[in-house]
Amino acid sequence: MENISALATVASSHTKPKTTKAESGFLASILRRKDGGTGRFFKDRTYHHAVLRALNQVAWHGADISEVLQATTKMQAGDEQNWHAEWSALAERNLARAHSARNRKSRGEALLRAHTYYARAQFYLPPYDAKRPVTYDRCRKAFYEGLDTLGVPYLKIDVPYGANKLKAVYYPAPKPVRGPLIVFHGGYDTIVEELYFFLAAEATSRGYSVLTFDGPGQGAPLREQGLRFTHEWEKPTSAVLDTFLATHNRPEKIVLIGLSMGGYLAPRAAAFEPRFDGVVSYDICYDVHDAYARKIPKFAAPLRRLGLGKLVDRLAALKARSSPELKWALATAPWTHGTNGLLEMVDHLAPYTLADVARNIKQDVMILVGAEDQFIPTGQVARFRKSLINARSVTTKIYDRASGGHEHSQLGAPTLWHSDFFDWLEEKFGAPESTDLK
């Protein structure tokens, strides 16, 4: 490849009859061609991220690589109806496979794949699209039927929360153990069922028990009761812990971990909940408001000072026509936060920062960071570490592109962050020890 003409000459000298100029030119063009991968499923990073989120579940039989890649060839970024149709079709094919499979394990794994694909299908639908609740119900049904078929032990828990109820799912360790309990919740757009693939399945295989839950603004509390997010995440988290410990022995250690925006929510809860011994930001989300505010055009502030805030919102709505990420954010915020328009959404997020509470965090802290996170500026890492003046210890893991963990929440690289997380867990709190008498 370093000397195209020389290679072409060698090729022609060993070929009879001799190649023509046209043939030699074609050979040279072949040798010159670079067939490198792009590293992305869509140019739009939000849609690329959403596909990675499905592939992230492969390790625990929640997806299969080739069928996902094939489905993406028919998808168009920004077209939520097309997105729903293709993922739903993939889910239904797996349901059909589940119903025709004679082997119990094959049947259960097909159901788990169907769950993941239904979860992806409903994701971009407008909040009040009639297909959303139907798809969400199918998603959950496939998940629990899959766990039951595979014989995975779990316990659904209803958590009293004022006049409402939160939803928790507990996955006990395969054997009675003495070791830390992992409490795990999601972020801005998660459902409790997918947390099984993100961490619970791997953790139980290593001997840990895991308590997962949907808080306000997430999963069933949002969809079935209209519960919106609260920045005071200690309230739902403490309610979940109270309900669980009312019927289970208190473990020696409890570690809280929050996914995506949960990187803010979990440390916020730990700042007010001393029953946690450790807390993990998976990954960094020190200041949600700052992350959103940085994406507002510079001309917005002077227009707002002139009383032209509605013009800013109209311009944002126009921009959303060509920006799938902005389109999704503006459509989702009225549902999850009760806000309308770009400026009101960003203003509403002002309390979602750890700046004023991080000093109250006294636990061991772990911070995971994607070096090319599209949602959270990596500069927040230094701010978070500096503010943790009373933490017992602070461990930071930054993943670059070469590692594969550079995306938001290390999507697509679960074994990478799992390795670091479980090493940290053993270092700080010890490995699970069997309590069997044998």
Image (tube, helix red, strand yellow):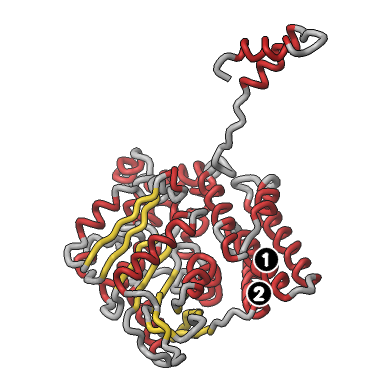
The N terminus - image quarter: top right
Q: Position of residue 328 (x, y in %)?
A: 52, 53
Asked if the residue under mark 2 is in contact with the one under mark 1, i.e. CB atoms within 8 Å, the reply is yes
Dot 1: element: helix
The correct choice, above or below, for 8 with respect to 134 in the image is: above
Which residue is depicted at the point 49% across and 82% down?
A: 172
List the residue tagged with mark 2.
146
**In front here: 57 or 14?**
14
Which residue is depicted at the point 42% across and 84% down?
A: 434
The correct choice, above or below, for 173 with respect to 408 in the image is: below
List the residue tagged with mark 1.
114
User: Position of 423 compared to 103: left or right?
Assistant: left
Dot 2: element: helix
Kind of residue at disc 1: Ala
Q: Position of residue 146 (x, y in %)?
A: 66, 74
User: Position of 267 compared to 408: left or right?
Assistant: left
Q: Position of residue 59 (x, y in %)?
A: 57, 61
Q: Residues within 10 Å of mark 2 (few under 14, many from 20)?
A: many
